[in-house]
Image (tube, rainbow, N blue to C red):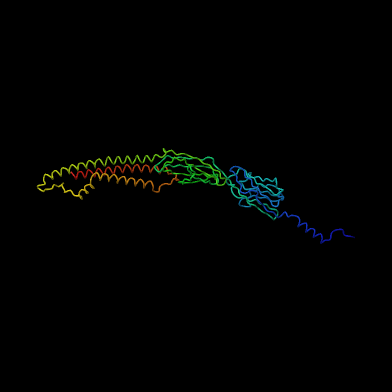
Amino acid sequence: MESTGLPLPRHFIILLLLQMVAPSSEHFTVTGLQGQILAPLGGVAELSCQLSPPQSAEHMEIRWFRDRYTQPVHLYKNGKDLYGETISRYVERTELLKGAIQEGKVTLRIFNVSVDDDGQYHCFFRDGDFYEEAIKEVKVTATSLEVQIHVHPPNIRGLLVECNSRGWFPQPQMEWRNSKGGVIPTTSESHSQDVDKLFNMKIALLLTQSSRENITCYLRNPVTGQEERTSIVLSDQLFPWNSIWIMILSTILVLLLFFVMVPSVDLHFRLKDQQKGARCSSQSSVHSRVCTRDYQPVTRCTDCLCKRRSPLVMGAAIILSSLCILISLILYLHYKSRVPVSDPHFQLDAILLEDLTMVLCVLTVFITMFISFIYFRFRGFLQS
């Protein structure tokens, strides 16, 4: 009987050649079709990945996960979506688009994006024992359209201006700018996160002198580059302490001049009258060469000594000394380390500083008037 089949060795050779020519479905790579994915807060994020070379992935396991393989965001296996193994916060929030799965392309759609969805995602394909993955990154963004500037009542330390804005993600860049676009050094800056992990920003500026230029609170989202700003023009009427200081020091100076210089001028003229009487009596007794107690030969030294001890000079010295002491104490209280601007008690501390300054001014004037009164009365009593 004659054999019609191929010889056995030739049959094996043909099978080997067929295996070498046919492409193997076990070898592939996974590539992402997008770069960084921007997802607005509350919106939809779509993450796509593709097998290379293109081939059907219907029979494969497709798993999307974050940090742990065993906690999938979405799982496709045995031709079905397995929602039971999905971690709780992604239940009913994901959908796998399989319209091009025969070409190896799938897209994960995430609904109602929250801040917790920000980060990396692994796109994982498994075919038997062979698997590959690609990593995609989602950047959740939120920009607030509400920027508020709050101007506090002026106080002795200056005018406090605060800028507040809520609902940002990620943390925005925040700064003050003048009308020319230049950055104004910030006095304090703070931020916090609410229950939704959105950033609430606060930036403060303490102005110590008036400026006719407008100032702008400027915020910028570092991911999207979106900017928000609010400007305000500050009136000179918001800086009353410049005129208040002038009024306080002028009042103090007037009081000191009146209560110190009036007694000193009175004593000066009384002493002058006494000296004239002493000279007259000394001239009448010059032949007897008897000098009275109040008469002394006038020399340069005694004349300079009398000028230095003159009531007018002493009154002026008392006024200048009290003013120097008062100004030094006020500057010390004003520039010493106190409650920072970022502290919620800053306004209370400023009010306390105002009260201390007023009490200090009153005490200084009272003590100076009392000392000058005692001094001129005592000296006038000794000279009489």
Pick whichever, 268 or 50, lies toward us.
268
Residue 51 horizontal/vertical position (percent): 69, 51
Task: Report the residue that reaches farthest toward the right.
Answer: 1
Quadrant of image for the N terminus: bottom right
Pick whichever, 245 or 25, lies toward us.
245
Task: Report the residue that reaches farthest toward the bottom.
Answer: 9
Figure disc tally = 0
Answer with the quarter of the image where residue 39 lies.
top right
Task: Report the residue that reaches farthest toward the left.
Answer: 288
Left or right: residue 52 compared with residue 384: right
234 up-or-down from 16: above or below:
above
Quadrant of image for the C terminus: top left
Pick whichever, 164 or 116, lies toward us.
164
Residue 72 horizontal/vertical position (percent): 64, 49
Residue 382 horizontal/vertical position (percent): 19, 45
Residue 167 horizontal/vertical position (percent): 54, 43
Pick whichever, 88 or 33, lies toward us.
33
Task: Report the residue that reaches farthest toward the front.
Answer: 300
Answer with the quarter of the image where residue 346 lies.
top left
Left or right: residue 38 compared with residue 324: right
